[in-house]
Image (cartoon, helix red, strand yellow):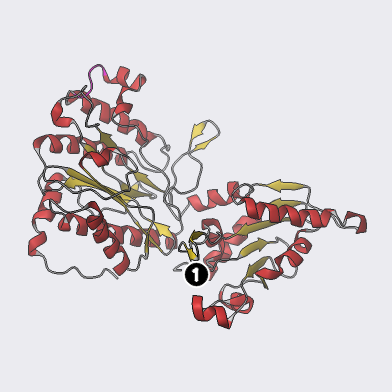
Amino acid sequence: MAINKTEFARRRDKLMAMMEPNSIAIVPTASVKTRSRDIEYPFRPDSNFLYLTGFVEPEAVLVLLPGRSHGQFVLFCRERNPEREIWDGLRAGPEGVLASHSADDAFPIDDIDDILPGLIEGRDRVYYAMGRDPLFDRRVMNWINVIRENVGSGAVPPGEFLDLDHLLHDMRLYKSAAEIRLLKTACEISAAGHCRAMQACVPGMMEYALEAELIYEFTRNGARAPAYPSIVGGGRNACVLHYIDNHSVLRDGDLVLIDAGCEYQGYAADITRTFPVSGVFSPAQKQLYELVLQVQLRAIETLRPGGHWNQAHETSVQVMVEGLVALGILHGEPEQLIANGAYKAFYMHRIGHWLGMDVHDVGDYRIGDQWRVLEPGMVLTVEPGIYIHPDDDRVAKKWRGLAIRIEDDVLITKNGCEVLSAGVPKTCSDIEQLMASARMKGPQRSLL
Protein backbone atom coordinates (compact mmCIF):
# COMPACT_ATOMS: atom_id res chain seq x y z
CA MET A 1 0.00 0.00 0.00
CA ALA A 2 1.15 3.53 -0.71
CA ILE A 3 -0.59 4.63 2.49
CA ASN A 4 2.02 4.77 5.26
CA LYS A 5 1.75 3.44 8.81
CA THR A 6 1.32 6.94 10.22
CA GLU A 7 -1.86 7.50 8.21
CA PHE A 8 -3.33 4.15 9.23
CA ALA A 9 -2.61 5.01 12.87
CA ARG A 10 -4.23 8.42 12.43
CA ARG A 11 -7.36 6.78 11.01
CA ARG A 12 -7.61 4.38 13.95
CA ASP A 13 -7.05 7.18 16.45
CA LYS A 14 -9.73 9.31 14.81
CA LEU A 15 -12.23 6.46 14.86
CA MET A 16 -11.51 5.65 18.52
CA ALA A 17 -11.94 9.32 19.44
CA MET A 18 -15.50 9.16 18.07
CA MET A 19 -16.41 5.95 19.87
CA GLU A 20 -18.36 6.03 23.12
CA PRO A 21 -16.35 5.64 26.35
CA ASN A 22 -15.42 2.13 27.45
CA SER A 23 -16.23 0.54 24.10
CA ILE A 24 -14.64 -1.97 21.73
CA ALA A 25 -14.68 -2.18 17.91
CA ILE A 26 -14.46 -5.49 16.05
CA VAL A 27 -13.66 -5.37 12.32
CA PRO A 28 -13.15 -8.66 10.43
CA THR A 29 -11.64 -8.77 6.98
CA ALA A 30 -13.49 -10.44 4.11
CA SER A 31 -13.84 -14.20 4.09
CA VAL A 32 -12.30 -16.40 1.43
CA LYS A 33 -14.94 -17.56 -1.06
CA THR A 34 -14.88 -20.86 -2.96
CA ARG A 35 -15.33 -20.53 -6.72
CA SER A 36 -15.62 -24.23 -7.50
CA ARG A 37 -14.41 -27.32 -5.62
CA ASP A 38 -10.91 -26.41 -4.33
CA ILE A 39 -10.53 -23.20 -6.39
CA GLU A 40 -11.10 -19.92 -4.59
CA TYR A 41 -11.94 -16.45 -5.88
CA PRO A 42 -8.98 -14.04 -5.69
CA PHE A 43 -8.98 -12.65 -2.17
CA ARG A 44 -9.62 -8.96 -1.61
CA PRO A 45 -9.70 -7.59 1.99
CA ASP A 46 -12.82 -5.95 3.34
CA SER A 47 -12.57 -2.22 2.59
CA ASN A 48 -13.24 -1.08 6.16
CA PHE A 49 -10.61 -3.48 7.49
CA LEU A 50 -8.12 -2.44 4.81
CA TYR A 51 -8.78 1.25 5.48
CA LEU A 52 -7.83 0.85 9.14
CA THR A 53 -4.93 -1.61 8.85
CA GLY A 54 -3.42 -1.93 5.37
CA PHE A 55 -3.20 -5.67 6.12
CA VAL A 56 -4.02 -7.78 3.04
CA GLU A 57 -3.98 -11.37 4.31
CA PRO A 58 -7.20 -13.35 4.79
CA GLU A 59 -8.38 -14.73 8.13
CA ALA A 60 -7.77 -11.58 10.13
CA VAL A 61 -9.72 -9.54 12.67
CA LEU A 62 -9.00 -6.01 13.91
CA VAL A 63 -9.92 -5.06 17.46
CA LEU A 64 -9.79 -1.48 18.75
CA LEU A 65 -9.80 -0.89 22.51
CA PRO A 66 -9.72 2.84 23.32
CA GLY A 67 -7.93 3.51 26.58
CA ARG A 68 -6.50 0.01 27.02
CA SER A 69 -3.26 0.27 28.97
CA HIS A 70 -1.65 -2.66 27.12
CA GLY A 71 -2.32 -1.12 23.73
CA GLN A 72 -5.39 -0.09 21.76
CA PHE A 73 -4.67 -1.78 18.39
CA VAL A 74 -4.98 -5.58 18.45
CA LEU A 75 -4.82 -7.79 15.36
CA PHE A 76 -5.62 -11.46 15.02
CA CYS A 77 -4.00 -13.15 12.01
CA ARG A 78 -2.75 -16.49 10.72
CA GLU A 79 0.38 -17.96 12.25
CA ARG A 80 3.48 -18.64 10.20
CA ASN A 81 3.25 -22.08 8.59
CA PRO A 82 6.25 -23.17 6.49
CA GLU A 83 4.33 -25.99 4.83
CA ARG A 84 1.38 -23.79 3.75
CA GLU A 85 3.71 -20.97 2.77
CA ILE A 86 5.27 -23.27 0.16
CA TRP A 87 1.85 -23.43 -1.50
CA ASP A 88 0.29 -20.05 -0.77
CA GLY A 89 3.14 -17.62 -0.09
CA LEU A 90 4.60 -15.98 3.00
CA ARG A 91 2.50 -15.03 6.00
CA ALA A 92 3.29 -12.17 8.34
CA GLY A 93 2.33 -14.05 11.48
CA PRO A 94 1.67 -12.27 14.79
CA GLU A 95 5.33 -11.33 15.21
CA GLY A 96 5.47 -9.86 11.72
CA VAL A 97 2.28 -7.87 12.28
CA LEU A 98 3.80 -6.27 15.37
CA ALA A 99 6.76 -5.08 13.28
CA SER A 100 5.18 -4.29 9.92
CA HIS A 101 1.81 -2.84 10.94
CA SER A 102 2.61 -1.34 14.35
CA ALA A 103 0.02 -3.45 16.19
CA ASP A 104 0.16 -3.12 19.97
CA ASP A 105 -0.77 -6.79 20.33
CA ALA A 106 -1.11 -9.60 17.80
CA PHE A 107 -2.50 -13.09 18.35
CA PRO A 108 -3.05 -16.21 16.22
CA ILE A 109 -6.48 -16.22 14.60
CA ASP A 110 -6.98 -19.78 15.90
CA ASP A 111 -6.89 -18.41 19.45
CA ILE A 112 -9.56 -15.75 18.93
CA ASP A 113 -12.33 -17.75 20.67
CA ASP A 114 -10.20 -17.95 23.80
CA ILE A 115 -8.89 -14.38 23.82
CA LEU A 116 -11.58 -12.08 22.41
CA PRO A 117 -14.26 -12.70 25.06
CA GLY A 118 -11.75 -11.46 27.64
CA LEU A 119 -11.18 -8.28 25.61
CA ILE A 120 -14.93 -7.68 25.27
CA GLU A 121 -15.71 -8.39 28.94
CA GLY A 122 -16.15 -5.22 30.98
CA ARG A 123 -16.74 -3.02 27.92
CA ASP A 124 -20.08 -1.21 27.88
CA ARG A 125 -20.54 -1.13 24.10
CA VAL A 126 -19.49 -3.13 21.05
CA TYR A 127 -19.05 -1.40 17.69
CA TYR A 128 -19.64 -3.97 14.97
CA ALA A 129 -21.30 -4.11 11.52
CA MET A 130 -24.01 -6.63 12.38
CA GLY A 131 -25.70 -8.31 9.42
CA ARG A 132 -22.89 -8.07 6.89
CA ASP A 133 -21.48 -11.56 7.55
CA PRO A 134 -24.00 -13.93 9.21
CA LEU A 135 -21.33 -16.50 10.05
CA PHE A 136 -19.16 -13.96 11.84
CA ASP A 137 -22.26 -12.49 13.50
CA ARG A 138 -22.82 -15.87 15.17
CA ARG A 139 -19.25 -15.93 16.40
CA VAL A 140 -19.64 -12.48 17.94
CA MET A 141 -22.82 -13.55 19.71
CA ASN A 142 -21.10 -16.71 20.93
CA TRP A 143 -18.39 -14.56 22.53
CA ILE A 144 -21.04 -12.45 24.21
CA ASN A 145 -22.79 -15.58 25.46
CA VAL A 146 -19.54 -16.86 26.94
CA ILE A 147 -19.37 -13.68 29.02
CA ARG A 148 -23.03 -13.91 30.01
CA GLU A 149 -22.52 -17.46 31.24
CA ASN A 150 -19.96 -16.12 33.69
CA VAL A 151 -22.00 -13.25 35.10
CA GLY A 152 -22.34 -15.16 38.35
CA SER A 153 -18.56 -15.08 38.67
CA GLY A 154 -18.45 -11.32 38.20
CA ALA A 155 -18.17 -11.09 34.41
CA VAL A 156 -19.76 -7.96 32.88
CA PRO A 157 -21.15 -8.35 29.35
CA PRO A 158 -21.60 -5.32 27.08
CA GLY A 159 -25.03 -3.72 27.23
CA GLU A 160 -25.22 -2.25 23.75
CA PHE A 161 -24.24 -2.92 20.14
CA LEU A 162 -23.55 0.11 17.95
CA ASP A 163 -23.15 0.31 14.17
CA LEU A 164 -19.52 0.94 13.31
CA ASP A 165 -20.30 1.79 9.68
CA HIS A 166 -21.93 5.12 10.52
CA LEU A 167 -18.67 6.50 11.90
CA LEU A 168 -16.26 4.74 9.59
CA HIS A 169 -18.08 5.45 6.34
CA ASP A 170 -18.17 9.16 7.05
CA MET A 171 -14.41 9.09 7.58
CA ARG A 172 -13.86 7.26 4.29
CA LEU A 173 -15.86 9.88 2.39
CA TYR A 174 -13.07 12.46 2.83
CA LYS A 175 -9.96 11.41 0.92
CA SER A 176 -6.48 12.24 2.19
CA ALA A 177 -3.67 13.46 -0.06
CA ALA A 178 -2.27 9.93 -0.23
CA GLU A 179 -5.65 8.49 -1.20
CA ILE A 180 -6.08 11.13 -3.89
CA ARG A 181 -2.71 10.16 -5.36
CA LEU A 182 -3.82 6.53 -5.57
CA LEU A 183 -7.15 7.50 -7.13
CA LYS A 184 -5.34 9.64 -9.70
CA THR A 185 -3.09 6.73 -10.59
CA ALA A 186 -6.09 4.41 -10.90
CA CYS A 187 -7.70 6.94 -13.25
CA GLU A 188 -4.53 7.37 -15.30
CA ILE A 189 -4.16 3.62 -15.79
CA SER A 190 -7.86 3.27 -16.60
CA ALA A 191 -7.67 6.17 -19.04
CA ALA A 192 -4.78 4.44 -20.83
CA GLY A 193 -6.94 1.31 -21.08
CA HIS A 194 -9.83 3.23 -22.63
CA CYS A 195 -7.49 4.92 -25.12
CA ARG A 196 -6.00 1.57 -26.05
CA ALA A 197 -9.48 0.15 -26.63
CA MET A 198 -10.42 3.06 -28.88
CA GLN A 199 -7.25 2.55 -30.90
CA ALA A 200 -7.73 -1.23 -31.17
CA CYS A 201 -11.41 -1.20 -32.12
CA VAL A 202 -12.32 -2.36 -35.64
CA PRO A 203 -15.56 -3.73 -37.12
CA GLY A 204 -15.84 -7.50 -36.76
CA MET A 205 -13.98 -7.56 -33.44
CA MET A 206 -15.56 -9.38 -30.52
CA GLU A 207 -16.59 -7.38 -27.46
CA TYR A 208 -14.45 -9.63 -25.26
CA ALA A 209 -11.41 -8.94 -27.43
CA LEU A 210 -11.86 -5.23 -26.80
CA GLU A 211 -12.24 -6.01 -23.09
CA ALA A 212 -8.89 -7.85 -23.28
CA GLU A 213 -7.20 -4.64 -24.45
CA LEU A 214 -8.45 -2.91 -21.30
CA ILE A 215 -7.32 -5.71 -18.98
CA TYR A 216 -3.90 -5.84 -20.64
CA GLU A 217 -3.35 -2.12 -20.10
CA PHE A 218 -4.55 -2.31 -16.50
CA THR A 219 -2.30 -5.26 -15.67
CA ARG A 220 0.89 -4.06 -17.30
CA ASN A 221 0.64 -0.82 -15.35
CA GLY A 222 0.35 -2.51 -11.97
CA ALA A 223 -3.43 -2.69 -11.53
CA ARG A 224 -3.97 -6.43 -11.16
CA ALA A 225 -7.75 -6.40 -11.40
CA PRO A 226 -10.70 -4.38 -12.65
CA ALA A 227 -12.60 -2.51 -9.95
CA TYR A 228 -15.82 -4.14 -11.27
CA PRO A 229 -16.86 -6.34 -14.22
CA SER A 230 -16.14 -4.39 -17.40
CA ILE A 231 -19.04 -3.41 -19.64
CA VAL A 232 -18.24 -3.59 -23.36
CA GLY A 233 -21.54 -3.27 -25.19
CA GLY A 234 -21.83 -2.76 -28.92
CA GLY A 235 -25.01 -1.54 -30.59
CA ARG A 236 -28.20 -2.54 -28.78
CA ASN A 237 -26.24 -4.30 -26.03
CA ALA A 238 -25.34 -0.88 -24.61
CA CYS A 239 -29.03 -0.31 -23.86
CA VAL A 240 -28.61 -2.86 -21.04
CA LEU A 241 -27.14 -0.72 -18.29
CA HIS A 242 -25.16 -3.51 -16.59
CA TYR A 243 -24.38 -5.59 -19.68
CA ILE A 244 -21.33 -7.76 -18.92
CA ASP A 245 -21.70 -10.73 -21.31
CA ASN A 246 -19.29 -9.05 -23.75
CA HIS A 247 -19.66 -11.86 -26.31
CA SER A 248 -21.12 -10.17 -29.41
CA VAL A 249 -19.53 -8.98 -32.62
CA LEU A 250 -18.86 -5.24 -32.93
CA ARG A 251 -20.55 -4.15 -36.13
CA ASP A 252 -19.66 -1.39 -38.56
CA GLY A 253 -22.04 1.53 -38.05
CA ASP A 254 -22.71 0.79 -34.37
CA LEU A 255 -21.52 2.56 -31.26
CA VAL A 256 -19.72 0.69 -28.50
CA LEU A 257 -20.07 1.70 -24.85
CA ILE A 258 -17.23 0.79 -22.47
CA ASP A 259 -17.70 1.22 -18.72
CA ALA A 260 -14.49 0.03 -17.07
CA GLY A 261 -11.96 1.00 -14.44
CA CYS A 262 -9.09 -0.63 -12.63
CA GLU A 263 -8.42 -1.03 -8.93
CA TYR A 264 -4.98 0.23 -7.94
CA GLN A 265 -3.67 -0.53 -4.46
CA GLY A 266 -7.18 -0.70 -3.07
CA TYR A 267 -8.66 2.34 -4.88
CA ALA A 268 -11.08 2.26 -7.80
CA ALA A 269 -11.53 4.18 -11.03
CA ASP A 270 -14.84 4.21 -12.92
CA ILE A 271 -14.83 5.60 -16.47
CA THR A 272 -17.29 5.30 -19.36
CA ARG A 273 -16.78 6.27 -22.97
CA THR A 274 -18.93 5.67 -26.04
CA PHE A 275 -17.44 5.71 -29.52
CA PRO A 276 -18.13 4.52 -33.07
CA VAL A 277 -16.89 1.03 -33.98
CA SER A 278 -15.88 2.35 -37.40
CA GLY A 279 -14.04 5.35 -35.97
CA VAL A 280 -16.49 7.94 -37.34
CA PHE A 281 -19.77 9.10 -35.78
CA SER A 282 -22.86 9.14 -38.01
CA PRO A 283 -24.83 12.42 -38.01
CA ALA A 284 -27.50 11.01 -35.66
CA GLN A 285 -24.91 9.45 -33.34
CA LYS A 286 -23.01 12.72 -33.20
CA GLN A 287 -26.13 14.76 -32.36
CA LEU A 288 -27.08 12.48 -29.50
CA TYR A 289 -23.50 12.16 -28.27
CA GLU A 290 -22.99 15.91 -28.17
CA LEU A 291 -26.15 16.28 -26.11
CA VAL A 292 -24.86 13.80 -23.50
CA LEU A 293 -21.50 15.56 -23.47
CA GLN A 294 -23.17 18.94 -22.97
CA VAL A 295 -25.18 17.47 -20.08
CA GLN A 296 -22.04 16.09 -18.47
CA LEU A 297 -20.02 19.29 -18.83
CA ARG A 298 -22.84 21.38 -17.39
CA ALA A 299 -23.21 18.98 -14.47
CA ILE A 300 -19.47 19.10 -13.73
CA GLU A 301 -19.63 22.89 -13.67
CA THR A 302 -21.96 22.70 -10.65
CA LEU A 303 -19.48 20.70 -8.56
CA ARG A 304 -17.84 22.92 -5.97
CA PRO A 305 -17.59 23.19 -2.18
CA GLY A 306 -20.86 24.41 -0.70
CA GLY A 307 -23.01 22.96 -3.46
CA HIS A 308 -25.19 19.98 -2.62
CA TRP A 309 -25.05 16.41 -3.86
CA ASN A 310 -28.22 16.54 -5.98
CA GLN A 311 -27.39 19.79 -7.76
CA ALA A 312 -25.48 18.06 -10.55
CA HIS A 313 -28.32 15.62 -11.13
CA GLU A 314 -30.92 18.38 -11.23
CA THR A 315 -28.80 20.23 -13.80
CA SER A 316 -28.34 17.08 -15.85
CA VAL A 317 -32.09 16.46 -16.01
CA GLN A 318 -32.83 20.05 -17.04
CA VAL A 319 -30.22 20.10 -19.83
CA MET A 320 -31.07 16.58 -20.95
CA VAL A 321 -34.80 17.26 -21.28
CA GLU A 322 -34.27 20.51 -23.14
CA GLY A 323 -31.95 18.69 -25.55
CA LEU A 324 -34.31 15.76 -26.08
CA VAL A 325 -37.11 18.19 -26.89
CA ALA A 326 -34.87 20.04 -29.35
CA LEU A 327 -34.05 16.74 -31.09
CA GLY A 328 -37.72 15.75 -31.26
CA ILE A 329 -37.29 12.70 -29.05
CA LEU A 330 -39.49 14.19 -26.31
CA HIS A 331 -42.47 16.43 -26.99
CA GLY A 332 -43.88 19.06 -24.67
CA GLU A 333 -42.74 21.68 -22.19
CA PRO A 334 -39.48 20.75 -20.42
CA GLU A 335 -40.77 21.60 -16.94
CA GLN A 336 -43.83 19.40 -17.37
CA LEU A 337 -41.75 16.57 -18.81
CA ILE A 338 -39.46 16.79 -15.80
CA ALA A 339 -42.37 16.91 -13.37
CA ASN A 340 -44.02 13.80 -14.80
CA GLY A 341 -40.73 11.91 -15.26
CA ALA A 342 -41.15 11.42 -19.02
CA TYR A 343 -37.38 11.65 -19.51
CA LYS A 344 -36.84 8.49 -17.43
CA ALA A 345 -37.68 6.36 -20.47
CA PHE A 346 -34.32 7.50 -21.87
CA TYR A 347 -32.33 8.62 -18.81
CA MET A 348 -33.33 6.29 -16.01
CA HIS A 349 -30.41 6.48 -13.59
CA ARG A 350 -28.93 9.20 -11.42
CA ILE A 351 -25.91 11.30 -12.31
CA GLY A 352 -23.34 9.43 -10.22
CA HIS A 353 -22.10 8.01 -6.92
CA TRP A 354 -19.24 8.30 -4.44
CA LEU A 355 -15.93 6.74 -5.46
CA GLY A 356 -13.01 5.49 -3.39
CA MET A 357 -11.96 2.09 -2.09
CA ASP A 358 -15.24 0.73 -3.43
CA VAL A 359 -16.47 1.69 -6.87
CA HIS A 360 -19.83 2.55 -5.32
CA ASP A 361 -18.16 3.96 -2.27
CA VAL A 362 -19.58 4.53 1.19
CA GLY A 363 -21.01 7.75 2.57
CA ASP A 364 -24.49 9.21 3.04
CA TYR A 365 -26.03 11.19 0.21
CA ARG A 366 -28.46 12.91 2.54
CA ILE A 367 -28.07 14.24 6.07
CA GLY A 368 -31.49 14.11 7.62
CA ASP A 369 -33.86 15.49 5.00
CA GLN A 370 -31.20 17.60 3.25
CA TRP A 371 -28.88 16.66 0.39
CA ARG A 372 -25.27 16.40 1.53
CA VAL A 373 -23.12 19.50 1.03
CA LEU A 374 -20.02 18.87 -1.10
CA GLU A 375 -16.66 19.42 0.61
CA PRO A 376 -13.00 19.21 -0.47
CA GLY A 377 -11.69 15.66 -0.55
CA MET A 378 -14.91 14.04 -1.74
CA VAL A 379 -14.68 12.06 -5.00
CA LEU A 380 -17.68 11.21 -7.16
CA THR A 381 -18.61 10.09 -10.64
CA VAL A 382 -20.55 12.14 -13.20
CA GLU A 383 -22.19 9.81 -15.73
CA PRO A 384 -25.26 11.00 -17.65
CA GLY A 385 -26.59 8.75 -20.38
CA ILE A 386 -29.26 8.37 -23.04
CA TYR A 387 -30.59 4.91 -23.93
CA ILE A 388 -33.12 4.44 -26.73
CA HIS A 389 -34.43 0.91 -27.03
CA PRO A 390 -34.17 -0.59 -30.53
CA ASP A 391 -37.91 -1.34 -30.56
CA ASP A 392 -39.10 2.05 -29.26
CA ASP A 393 -41.43 3.18 -32.03
CA ARG A 394 -42.22 6.43 -30.22
CA VAL A 395 -39.02 7.94 -31.63
CA ALA A 396 -37.68 8.36 -35.16
CA LYS A 397 -35.91 5.29 -36.55
CA LYS A 398 -32.53 7.02 -36.72
CA TRP A 399 -32.38 7.20 -32.91
CA ARG A 400 -33.43 3.64 -32.14
CA GLY A 401 -30.82 1.37 -30.61
CA LEU A 402 -28.50 4.23 -29.68
CA ALA A 403 -27.06 4.19 -26.16
CA ILE A 404 -24.52 6.76 -24.97
CA ARG A 405 -22.97 7.27 -21.55
CA ILE A 406 -20.02 9.49 -20.65
CA GLU A 407 -18.54 9.08 -17.17
CA ASP A 408 -15.69 10.81 -15.39
CA ASP A 409 -14.29 10.71 -11.86
CA VAL A 410 -14.25 14.10 -10.15
CA LEU A 411 -12.49 15.36 -7.02
CA ILE A 412 -13.99 18.25 -5.06
CA THR A 413 -11.21 20.77 -4.38
CA LYS A 414 -10.98 23.92 -2.28
CA ASN A 415 -11.89 26.12 -5.23
CA GLY A 416 -14.03 23.89 -7.40
CA CYS A 417 -13.32 20.44 -8.82
CA GLU A 418 -10.76 18.42 -10.76
CA VAL A 419 -11.59 15.74 -13.34
CA LEU A 420 -9.25 12.88 -12.49
CA SER A 421 -10.12 10.88 -15.61
CA ALA A 422 -9.44 13.64 -18.14
CA GLY A 423 -6.88 11.45 -19.93
CA VAL A 424 -9.56 9.86 -22.12
CA PRO A 425 -10.82 11.90 -25.11
CA LYS A 426 -14.52 12.66 -25.03
CA THR A 427 -15.31 15.14 -27.81
CA CYS A 428 -16.34 13.63 -31.12
CA SER A 429 -13.40 15.15 -32.94
CA ASP A 430 -10.83 14.01 -30.37
CA ILE A 431 -12.20 10.46 -30.35
CA GLU A 432 -12.20 10.27 -34.14
CA GLN A 433 -8.68 11.66 -34.29
CA LEU A 434 -7.35 9.14 -31.75
CA MET A 435 -8.97 6.22 -33.57
CA ALA A 436 -7.70 7.43 -36.95
CA SER A 437 -4.14 7.72 -35.64
CA ALA A 438 -4.05 4.18 -34.26
CA ARG A 439 -2.34 2.58 -37.26
CA MET A 440 0.35 5.23 -37.26
CA LYS A 441 1.36 4.69 -33.64
CA GLY A 442 3.98 2.24 -32.44
CA PRO A 443 3.72 -0.01 -29.39
CA GLN A 444 2.46 1.75 -26.28
CA ARG A 445 4.79 2.02 -23.29
CA SER A 446 3.89 1.28 -19.70
CA LEU A 447 2.85 4.22 -17.52
CA LEU A 448 4.70 3.08 -14.40
Residue at image point 11% right, 46% down: 252
327 lies above or below 157: above
Query: Would residue 246 appear left or right of 151 to someone viewing this image?
Result: left
Give the side of residue 284 with respect to residue 423, left or right.
left
Question: Looking at the image, which is closer to me, 432 or 251?
Answer: 251
Q: Position of residue 420 (x, y in %)?
A: 32, 54
- Most extreme residue toward the right is 152
Q: Kindly identify which residue carries mark 1.
A: 4
- Which range of residues does the magenta coloring cover? 329-333
Dot 1 amino acid type = Asn
Q: Residue at x 44, y 61 (%)?
A: 266
Residue 393 appears in which quarter of the rendering? Answer: top left
**The magenta stretch spans residue 332:** yes
Crowd around label 1: few <14 · some 14–19 · many ≥20 (10 Å) = few
Residue 22 shows up from this direction: no
> Residue 178 at x, y = what percent?
43, 63
Q: Residue 142's quadrant in the figure?
A: bottom right
Residue at the spot 92% in from the left edge and 59% down from the top edge: 153
* Residue 323 position (above or below residue 60): above
Q: Position of residue 108 (x, y in %)?
A: 67, 72
Check residue 79 for magenta coloring.
Answer: no
